[in-house]
Image: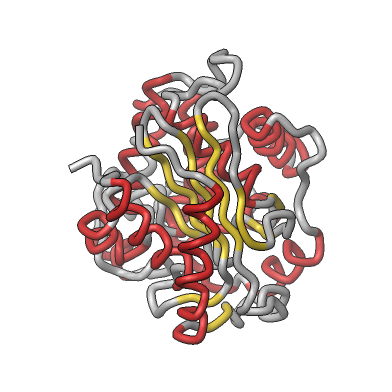
Amino acid sequence: MSYISKTDLDYWLEHVRIYANNGDVADYIPALANQSPEISAAAFYSIGGDCPKAGRSDYTFTIQSISKVLTLALALIQHGEEAVFTRVGKEPTSDPFYSIRKLELEQPGIPLNPMINAGALAVTNMIRGRDSEEMVGEILDLIRRLCHDDSITYDRDVAQSEFQTAFLNRSLAYFMKQNGIITGSIEELMDVYTKQCAIEVNVKQLARIGAVFANDGRDPETNNPLIPATVARICKTFMVTCGMYDNSGTFAINVGIPAKSGVSGAILGVIKNEGGIAVFGPALDDKGNSVVGVELLEKLAQQKKWSIF
């Protein structure tokens, strides 16, 4: 066990927070542009329930693309592997997460994986519900179970801001609808997708989600199953191959753990049989990953010898 202490988190967060100057806050989503790049926080939730924290650990942020892991888990639980992977692929891509290019090259327009926007939209379209409210409710129910916190909800201002500016995502969705990958109302899908991205947590809550995956889908304290082990394994595999956008290969070499980032500045990491780690710092590099978060995880991975490789 390479247990992470509060001393570890305090030391490395203080050491790397200056890297925020090397990144920029996401400004293409107006509600995210207001975040202060100096904010930083980290938490490690161990299997067993200990949770050392550092920095602004009570600060809440939206999970953004980290939601892609959770909607994938939900779709797999609801429909099974065969149904899900007829509508989304399993292969990584070197293209940016928002790219439409590969949809035109692949036949019949199936997105390459669930961690790019096109794939995530196809997955969200599968979530059960008679309308967008029920679909968002299904997603929130899962996240509340994983966090053991029924108060978790989404930030309405961020959701509305994303909904009003999601022109490229609408383009991806309409292209896939033309090819039979997506069904139903595109506006209803965008309502669900922008709300799932706007779900708010703090680093402790996010780290607890990571601890569930680290414990093969079981609650880190009670050991009760929350996600089937096969679903947890599939999600962790996608986090390794695709979770850090088109920087996933470099991250796998430098850190070597399953991880997923979001453009709010959050990163979720999974250390098998040990726990989940969450880092937040809103200044992003040119790939869309938290500069502070990546630096912190690299330092800890070297110190703790985390790499699964």
Would you place residue 83 above or below residue 267 in this image?
A: above
Q: Could one spot residue 215 in this view of the protein?
A: yes
Nearer to the camera, 198 or 162: 198
Residue 41's image quarter? bottom right
Residue at the image position 62 percent from the left and 31 percent from the top? 146
Q: Residue furthest front?
A: 7
Question: 125 or 213, which lies in front?
Answer: 213
Q: From the top left corner, tell me how far across and down residue 37 is, in percent.
A: 61, 79
> Residue pushed farthest left?
309
* Residue 230 in the image, given as x and y percentages of width and height: 37, 22
Number of residue marks? 0
Q: Is 89 placed above or below 150 here?
A: below
Examine the rendered structure and indicate whether residue 70 appears above or below residue 215: below
Q: Quadrant of the C terminus?
A: top left
Q: Nearer the viewer, residue 246 or 214?
A: 214
* Apparent side of residue 256 relative to residue 184 in the rendered image (left or right): left
Residue 81 percent location from the top left of the image:
37, 27
In this rendering, does residue 187 appear at all? Answer: no
The structure's colour scheme is secondary structure
- Which residue is found at the position 40% from the left and 65% from the top? 294
Q: Quadrant of the N terminus?
A: top left
Residue 167 vertical position relative to residue 4 in the rendered view, above or below: below
Q: Residue 255, position in %: x, y? A: 29, 55
Q: Residue at x 46, y 63 (%)?
A: 12
* 29 or 274: nearer the viewer: 274
Q: Specify the farthest residue to the bottom.
A: 21
Q: Residue at x 64, y 31 (%)?
A: 142
